[in-house]
Image: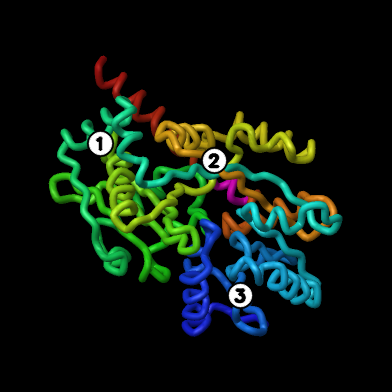
Amino acid sequence: MEVLTSNSATAKAHDLVRLHGRNSTASQILNPGIQYWFTAGEDAVAGYVRRGSWLVVAGEPVCSLQLLPGAVREFEAYARGRGLRICYMCASGPMRDLFSGADDHATITVGAQPVWNPFDWPGIVRARSSLRAQLHRSLNKGVRIESMPAAAGAGDPGIRHTLAEWLQSRLLPPMHFLVEPHVLSGVVDDRLLFVARREGQVVAFLVASPVAARNGYLVEELARSPHAPNGTSELLIDAAMARFADEGCTYATMGLVALARGTVEENPLWLRTLMVIARAHANRFYNFRGLEHFRAKMHPGYWEKIYAISNERRFSFQALYAVGGAFSGISPVRAVGLAVAKGARTEFGAAVAAAGKVMGRR
């Protein structure tokens, strides 16, 4: 059965996420813009967005592991009956194993996510002088971290301003789906919100979402003003890890690092080539290498590979394009075009400002 986004559907999805959310994306199906499909027994839910003839699923159906095979079969029968294809984006190991050896599903590796046990975090900080230096740098600049109810975050002027500054600093148009910037406008009952202030002003914030079946959290959003001192992001993460440990959590992740080093080699040649080119040359639009470096310097316990699985014999460019559309909310070609235009305007403005300074010295 299909249920579009509504208050009752969201409540049902929320209950399943609280019980069975194992994939780090589970809570993200509660974000704005996600549609729901439920099994006939309402014991499993898939959160998805539709792009053309594709349903792009956030991770995988949320249900108990025992019910996962049946939920997938029922969901795919629903899609097949309507002439639709499916791509499970950010699927985890159990979904990969479910389709291992199948000739009617194709799996690719899209990257990896770093994982920590929050109880190990104090030891990581003690052992890493560079990390301690960043924490001390932000503290010495007067940055302080506080927690606040996530429900109050959406309407907080300081948080809204910081989010706007953060989005403005990026070349790509605001992304959605599994990188939804307006997380605090969704269901936030179970989410944690940490705010970094300097001289009373919000300069950054972090939103963490529960991964209930793994006894942990996903750091879903970390937005930082360009005026935030160095080390502010690390200070937010330090506060979050302390809270996770206080709650007895044993799992924490900062989410997918797309095209992470060592994850694309097993993909088809055409896709591997595209990924290598993107990693090498697309950093002006999306900082793949910088994101990986930031997470790696915090020394996660291990990295989990993350997959995209399409219900077709070979993973196609059409599936990849649908995924791109799910994230951008518009044509991926248009999204890149807008990014190029914004980059050109930014560089032209910087050049004019630099020329003005030179002329002013003469």
10 Å neighbourhood of mark 3: few (<14), some, or many (≥20)? many
Q: Residue at x 35, y 34 (%)?
A: 124
Q: Amino acid at mark 2?
A: Trp
Q: Amino acid at mark 3?
A: Ala
Q: Is residue 149 above or below residue 221?
A: below
Q: Tell me where residue 79 appears, x and y as whole percent.
A: 75, 73
Q: In this figure, which residue is indicated by the disc labeled 2?
A: 303
Please state the extent of the stretch shown in magenta in the rendering. Answer: 334-338
Q: Mark 3 or 1, which is nearer the eye?
A: 3
* Picture mark count: 3
Q: Sequence-wise, which precedes: disc 2 or disc 3?
A: 3
Is residue 362 found inside the magenta-colored segment of the image? no
Q: Amino acid at mark 1?
A: Pro
Q: Is residue 80 above or below residue 249?
A: below
Q: Residue at x 51, y 46 (%)?
A: 172
Q: In this figure, which residue is indicated by the disc labeled 1?
A: 229
Q: Could you tell me if residue 63 is visible in this image? A: yes
Q: Secondary structure at mark 2?
A: strand
On residue 44, the disc is 3
